[in-house]
Image (cartoon, rainbow, N blue to C red):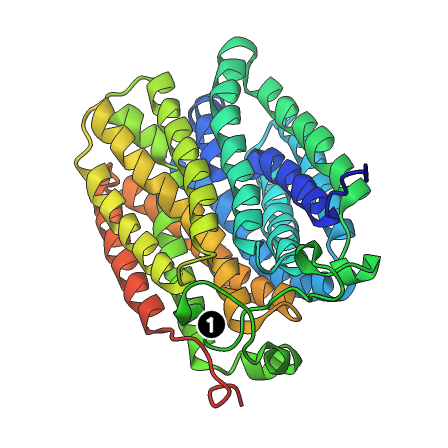
Amino acid sequence: MKPIRIYYGWLVVAASSGIGFANAATAIGILTIFVIPMSEEFGWNRTQVAGATSLGAILGAALAPFSGRLVDRRGSRALLTLGGLTVVLACGYLALAQTLAGFYAAFTVARIADQGLIKIGTSPTIGKWFSRYRGRATGIVFFSEAAGMTLMAPLVQLVISGAGWRSAWVLLGGGMLVLGVIPCAWLIRRQPEDLGLLPDGAPASQPACEPGSGAEESGPRTGGGSIEQLQSTPLAEIIRAPSFWLVLVSLFVVSTATSGVGLHLVPHLIQQGLKPLEAVGAISVMSIAGAVGALSLGFLAERLPPRYMLAAVYFLGAISMMVLINADDLPKTYVFAVIQGITGSGVNTLAPLLWASYYGRASLGSIFGISRAAQVAGFAVGPLASGIVYDATGSYQQAFIYFAVLALVSSALILAARPPNQRELP
């Protein structure tokens, strides 16, 4: 009997999933658990805490396009290893933080590593290793990210309750070292061709199919099209296509809306009358829904156009805001958590699939770097806007109404972003 050979791309998926799981350490959904204990100890207000997330997001956004180009040229192994090590060191410093300046320095560095290195290194690499199975492979990675939030949120709350918030930062840093840094340094490679392989592990006599121009509108991707022409199109020409900018703006707008809730969710729910563990439980419910949503949407995206799926996910984001505004008990809170979880994971999972279906594999890292910069800019605006509204009014309600409107706007923008064709690409 011949030994069963595992396509190396699945090992790349495993390493990417590991660092995605451990990257919960940098998530706003985890930081929100630290807001009250750290604020009570140091006397910080909500706007001050939110400022650190915004500063790190802005700097990460500035780094993202350069990181994306590096992924195309050199691969993401060094990028992911460096990003993971940076998060480990930042968590160690956060465990020793004594001042607001120290908190800003450490968490800003962690967010730069998250948004400018780790996020840029995972999705484009998966896109380069897979074509026909790109949806499910991407879904697995984002499932792991959501699973990290699901498991780490209650664990961090338990550690804070039992041993203090400093011990919780040590836990998060150790998890990144074991689950993220080591597997990525060992397993990540640039693309299948570097190992004499083809995407999806297809035999050399049967090249893996790539989506072509306009394939996204046809649903299932069955190959063909003019993808070789698209792959040879310079990035400078791709970014002049109207559809590129419509997608990009939609991602910025929806990211502003979704991120505006995350950092402030636990304090808001506690203000609404929920107990701390109940409020953190909403994060776990959100993460579970996000994990299931990422995996399901990844498989569905192999058969349905990602553009229409993204429009539906954006619309769910608007619904989640309206539910949160009226949530005054645990059941309503968990309904919000389910919808918001699907929204967040849906955007992250479907956006790289949309880019791949429009423009192929060759410039995927560069395109995703620019795309991630737009998202991260939204991540910088959202939490800060919520903090300013809360400090001015004593409530988040007005901010959540604005976010619902923004989600609807983003849905309209993505529907207008039709797939590019050869006439659209100069």
For the point 37% across and 36% down, which residue is it? 264
Image position, residue 67 (x, y; %): 68, 60
Where 327 sits versus 163, above or below?
below
Where 58 sits versus 289, above or below?
below
For the point 81% across and 36% down, which residue is it? 1
Residue 220: name its quadrant: bottom left
Query: Left or right of 316: which side holds 30?
Result: right
Residue 199: name its quadrant: bottom right
What is the crowding at mark 1: few (fewer than 14 residues within 10 Å), some, or many (at least 20)? many
Image position, residue 12 (x, y; %): 70, 46
Q: Amino acid at mark 1?
A: Ala
Image position, residue 192 (x, y; %): 75, 58
Query: Which residue is at the front of the view, 414 or 371?
Result: 414
Query: Left or right of 341: which side holds 75?
Result: right
**Residue 301 in sight here:** yes
**Residue 383 in sight here:** no
Image position, residue 343 (x, y; %): 36, 47
